[in-house]
Amino acid sequence: MLCFDHRRLAAALLILSAPASGLIPTMAQAAVPGSTASVNVDQAGVALRGFDPVAYFETGKPTKGVDAIATTFDGVRYLFATEAHRRTFLAAPAKYVPQFGGFCAVGTSFGEKVDADPQTGRVVDGKLYVNYSAKTQMIFDKDVPGTIARAEQNWPKVKDKPQ
């Protein structure tokens, strides 16, 4: 059986998946470095960088929310594109929040807490998953069930780690 360092593999995957120009500038604003929070929020406590969590389910596309149409669930602020989406969320919030606290599903599958880009959002079996980048999303897509299973197994250990 091969033994390898999951942290190095996760770091290598994220480095390889980063855009050639370096990290996306908004990445620094998304997650709070060093935070041990189990939900990925920005400095203002907003999840999904302000994207509407219900839109992924309703339209299949990431849609930016509006600051004036918001609600708080479990201490985290979510923005919505429409009032109807906010009402839908309020009826069953746990259904719409991203898995693994909105951190990268691939990173979590390797035991790491990694920021995620909401543009990668995808609903699988009624659950929302996000990943670090479009390239990381391709890694997720190569083995969706395996990645999700590994991430679910790792999440209890990962969720309280500092980012």
Image (cartoon, grey):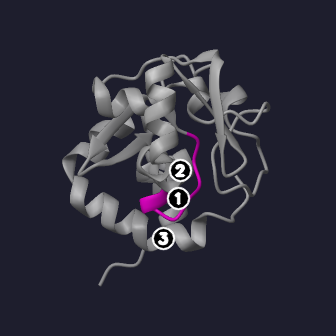
State the image quarter where residue 158 is shown.
bottom right
Up-down relation of residue 142 to residue 38 (above or below): above
User: Is 152 on the left-hand or right-hand side of 126?
Assistant: right
Q: Nearer the viewer, mark 3 or mark 1?
A: 3
Residue type highlighted by circle 1: Arg
Q: Residue at x 28, y 49 (%)?
A: 126
Using the image as rendered, state which of residue 83 and residue 5 is in the foreground.
83
Using the image as rendered, state which of residue 47 and residue 161 is in the foreground.
47
Residue type highlighted by circle 2: Ala
Q: Residues within 10 Å of mark 1 (few under 14, many from 20)?
A: few
Mark 2–mark 3 contact, CB under 8 Å?
no
Q: Which residues are magenta?
A: 108-115
Tell me if I can see residue 84 in this picture. yes
Q: Which residue is mark 2?
A: 11
Q: Callout 3: helix, strand or loop?
A: helix
Instruction: Give how far across and how far down residue 144 sits, in percent.
Output: 24, 53
Q: What is the spatial separation of the Cα atoms under label 2 and label 3, in whole angstroms?
A: 16 Å
Q: Which mark is residue 154?
A: 3
Q: What is the spatial separation of the Cα atoms under label 3 and label 1, in whole angstroms?
A: 16 Å
Using the image as rendered, state which of residue 143 and residue 18 is in the foreground.
143
Up-down relation of residue 119 to residue 77 (above or below): above
Q: Residues within 10 Å of mark 2 (few under 14, many from 20)?
A: some
Q: Residue at x 48, y 52 (%)?
A: 94
Instruction: Give how far across and how far down residue 16 sits, in percent.
Output: 44, 37
Q: Residue at x 33, y 79 (%)?
A: 2
Mark 1–mark 2 contact, CB under 8 Å?
yes
Residue type highlighted by circle 3: Asn
Q: Nearer the viewer, mark 2 or mark 3?
A: 3
Q: Residues within 10 Å of mark 3 (few under 14, many from 20)?
A: some
Q: Which residue is mark 1?
A: 8
Instruction: Give how far across and how far down residue 63 sits, in percent.
Output: 43, 18
Q: Residue at x 43, y 40 (%)?
A: 131
